[in-house]
Amino acid sequence: MHRILIVGAGATGSAAALRLRQLGNVELEVWEKARGPGGRMSTNRQEVNGATVRADMGAQYLSVDESDSASLQVADMLLSSGVCAQVSSEHLSATPERPKQAKHLAGTAGGVNDALKLLLEEAGATVHYEKRVASLDLQSGLWRARPFEGAPGMFDAVLVAVPGCGVGGDNLLKIHGSWEGMLKQEQNKQLMAAQHDQRWSFAFFLPNDCQGVCKRYFGPKAVEKVVDDDVLHLLCYQSRKTEIASKAASGGLVLVAHTTKEWAKLHAQRGGKDERLLKEVAACVQKLIGLEGPLSKLTSVSKVITWKQSQVERPVSSDGPYMVVSHSPPLLLAGDYFTHSSFSGCVQSGFAAAESLAALLKEATPKAADVCPDVSEGTGKKGKGKGGKGKGSQGKDRYKHDSWDYEGGSNGKDHSKSGKGGKSSKGKRREGQSGYGGYGRYGWDPYN
């Protein structure tokens, strides 16, 4: 049986895992740096007045292109399972990023990342959380994957489903090893040409006595409003969205604000723990919805994620929705940076890459299961299916990584105003040659 590693448990990686399971009997491992699945479909949770309240910090909905059979197949699975429900367009705003001819799904329990938990469960994948890939090296006809922390692994094939090249903290530029030297010059050029915008996302968990103000601002049906002033792009009524999807009271009150990309770019060098910026955005929201009283009504319980690579503005110009770096042993790249930033874009890339990888392995003899890598580095934290964590001890390595107190998130940083914070440490910055395969103009900082 072939051992396959999928790097990243976002929408693309989860879709690829599902498709690989459909195509044959393989052993699937998924390594994800965060504490749960999600990527840019990350969901934060907070205990407010004795209730667990969740907020979607990235994608607000799963936008499904009804002309794409793969996306419809996945959407039907999510709807029939009860994990997601369709939200009528009458509740939504016509944002530039949202496909016009699409149906939109929301998580019935308050988080879109529940959809990815189901895909991974259906794939039967062994998911290792808080396990981030540092390098991929060709060794004896196999791929040796080494994490920043924990044990390495040997695989017959690898599918990398992390964000493309850019300024974000977790993307292709952060994964080193001999695989970099296998990129053709044209592939290198294509990867470096992809562009993403930047946005910040703020979740404000409000007291229940603010319900009336929110209902007056959003009206009887809307769950979001386009703002597009100097600071805010979109304001989302997360609580109402959850109530519509679940047909039950959400148990808390939360608004999610997405900044404009211009505002995010202006403050790109600042961190999400900057109190001044939190208050600036909170004041804008307070004025917008007409909330009286102290600003602390918004800021006392809040979350911030700085998305340094958010929506794809210019995808990779390639022959298909994925890229083959190595045919034998297979190593493929997939992600919305080959298609477009929507759930369908991720599914299209993940499914196509999985089908190509399966074809490349068809005549190959499985070897990874018979090889024992050096396990002296320890073991990582492991989960199965829905993302539950099993017992395991983390080994010590020369690298440390950030862990954040949110469910998922692969390319943004989460900063909480209250609740339990994650551990953090500073990485060493290196200077190197520009372009992919070197450390780039931004240096190598695995914790950026």
Image (spheres, helix red, strand yellow):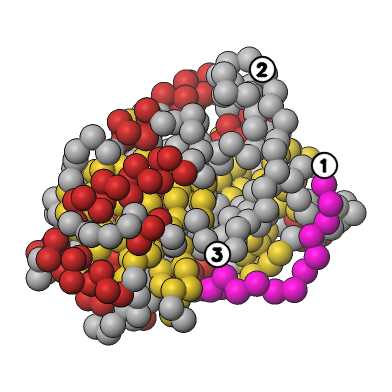
Q: Which residue is mark 2?
A: 432
SS for tag 1? Answer: loop
* Marks 2 and 3, the one that precedes in the sequence: 3
Question: x%, y% of residue 69?
Answer: 27, 61
Q: Which residue is mark 1?
A: 398
Q: Nearer the viewer, mark 2 or mark 3?
A: 3
Marks 1/3: CA–CA distance? 29 Å
Residue at the farthest front position: 293
Marks 2/3: CA–CA distance? 39 Å
Residue 61, picture quadrant: bottom left
Q: Using residue 125 as the reference point, say whether residue 298 is left or right of it.
A: left
SS for tag 3? Answer: loop
Amino acid marked by disc 3: Gly
Residue 222, picture quadrant: bottom left
Amino acid marked by disc 2: Gly
User: Which residue is at a point 40% across and 40% down the rendered structure image?
Assistant: 277
Does 420 lie within the magenta span?
no
The reply to whether residue 42 is visible in this rendering is: yes
Frontmost residue, 86 versus 55: 55
Residue at the farthest top position: 433
Magenta stretch, residue numbers? 385-397
Q: Which residue is mark 3?
A: 419
Q: Quadrant of the N terminus?
A: bottom right
Does 396 lie within the magenta span?
yes
Magenta: main secondary structure equals loop
Amino acid marked by disc 1: Arg
User: Which residue is at a point 41% across and 24% down the rendered structure image?
Assistant: 193
Marks 1/2: CA–CA distance? 20 Å
Q: Nearer the viewer, mark 1 or mark 3?
A: 3
